[in-house]
Image (tube, coloured by chain):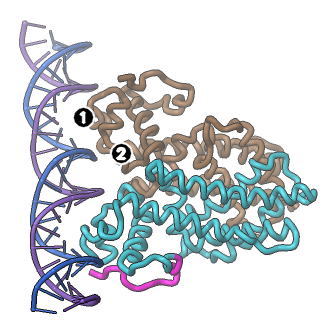
Chain colours: A brown, B cyan, C blue, D purple
DNA sequence: CAACATACTAAGCGGTTGCTTAGAGCTAAG
DNA sequence: CTTAGCTCTAAGCAACCGCTTAGTATGTTG
């Protein structure tokens, strides 16, 4: 068996997770959940991918659901991070930077992003409440940028909340259709989406 | 037990499914799959929702996966239907009509749409091939409308395939975030999205 | 009436699930 | 060396899974 051992470039997002075995479990679980879905993944799948016995999961995590929660929480925190302190002198610049980096994140980390976006329903109520708060913060970041542009008169949309929803939705759905084998790189997708959104909101 | 018996307005999409018990099973399965996901739904859940015994499922369907396939196939055929023979004298009009009705469909039938969009991976290879062909046709319908507009010079996008992907993605993702309890009706979402997409593609 | 077909249920089978238990191997302090 | 603590595994338990079997109720045809 060639259990996942090496630390790929894309796995650097888990670098703060210690100890080593706990991080390997998270990486294995993230890939399995993204590939087959939370409910179709067994704890034996995860342990096997991490190169350990099924019981080893429970040394580092309370339950399978706890693994999902850690992936979801860290994923949401990281995606919130790319919308924080977005550079740009004008709202148009800040929106372009926000959209390109947020869409880019959902392509680059599409594996984790799929778990983050499509497995919310598998979290228990307490854990769901934690990530729901993170999601409100993500929406708030994007909305405030669009709001700034509307106040300055450069964005022209009838419905602030609706426009925010559409912009976030567009970026998030990248995680669903993105394939690493496709023609577009995450950077190109980010650039294309920033352009499309700018045209969508400016008059 | 208050098993689901009545035939809601939203269930009219299954009107061609006979006999009655088979249709009740499909409706029950569609709701359960949308609510909890395919793998988290048991055949006992479905039978119970349809007001029948677990074994009754296998009178009308070969397997649980066959139920998913029928929902996915019919759902794809119906959503392809709303993109066929879209009225409009100009490409701009046809795109507006296509986007508004396609987005509207994903709001109105968000229950089925979620199964259609998020449970593709649970289909077996033969069934997956069938719906993959339907998905290619859906993409083709939208692309040809945008292509017409580019040929006439009214749409201005550098990447036809990328723009098609973005427009479809925007509409499809409505199924993820739409809630019947929300402020916007499916019609309003369709109108808003048609407007946003028109601005996104015209110069 | 008999003979057969259809639609359904009660019961349960073999396999798999998430998770636990008991204990082994290793490290490090006293 | 002893003891304690941490990380891990082998084995397995109770519950649940998709699906099957055997049999019942009902309707139809001659």
Q: Position of residue B172 (x, y in %)?
A: 62, 60
Q: Position of residue B201 (x, y in %)?
A: 83, 57
Q: Say which of B57 and B36 sits in front.
A: B57
Residue at 66% in and 58% down: B137
Q: Which mark is residue A55?
A: 1
Q: Secondary structure at mark 1?
A: helix
Q: Position of residue B126 (x, y in %)?
A: 47, 50
Which residue, given by chain and number where applicable, does mark 2 sit on? Answer: A66
Name the chain under label 1. A
**Is residue A55 something one can see in this rendering?**
yes
Name the chain under label 2. A
Residue at 63% in and 35% down: A181
Q: Is residue B2 magenta?
A: yes
Report the span colored magenta. B1-13
Q: Position of residue B63 (x, y in %)?
A: 34, 60
Q: Quadrant of the N terminus of chain A?
A: top left
Quadrant of residue A197 within the rendered picture: bottom right
């Amino acid at each position: 068996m060639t259990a996942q051992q090496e630390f790929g470039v894309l796995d650097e997002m888990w670098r703060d997770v210690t100890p080593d075995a706990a991080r390997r479990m998270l990486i294995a679980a993230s890939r399995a959940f993204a590939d087959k879905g939370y409910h179709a993944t067994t704890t034996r799948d995860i342990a096997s991918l991490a190169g350990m016995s099924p019981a080893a999961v429970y040394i580092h995590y309370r339950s399978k659901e706890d693994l999902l929660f850690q992936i979801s929480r860290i994923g949401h925190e990281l995606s919130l991070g790319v919308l924080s302190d977005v550079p740009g002198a004008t709202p148009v610049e800040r929106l372009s930077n926000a959209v390109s980096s947020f869409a880019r994140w959902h392509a680059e980390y599409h594996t984790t992003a799929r778990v983050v976006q499509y497995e919310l329903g598998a979290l228990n109520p307490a854990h769901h409440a934690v990530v729901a708060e993170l999601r409100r913060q993500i929406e708030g970041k994007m909305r405030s940028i669009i709001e700034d542009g509307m106040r300055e008169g450069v964005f022209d949309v009838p419905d602030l909340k609706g426009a925010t929803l559409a912009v976030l939705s567009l970026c998030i759905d990248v995680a669903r259709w993105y394939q690493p084998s496709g023609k577009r790189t995450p950077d190109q997708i980010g650039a294309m989406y920033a352009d499309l959104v700018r045209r969508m909101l400016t008059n």
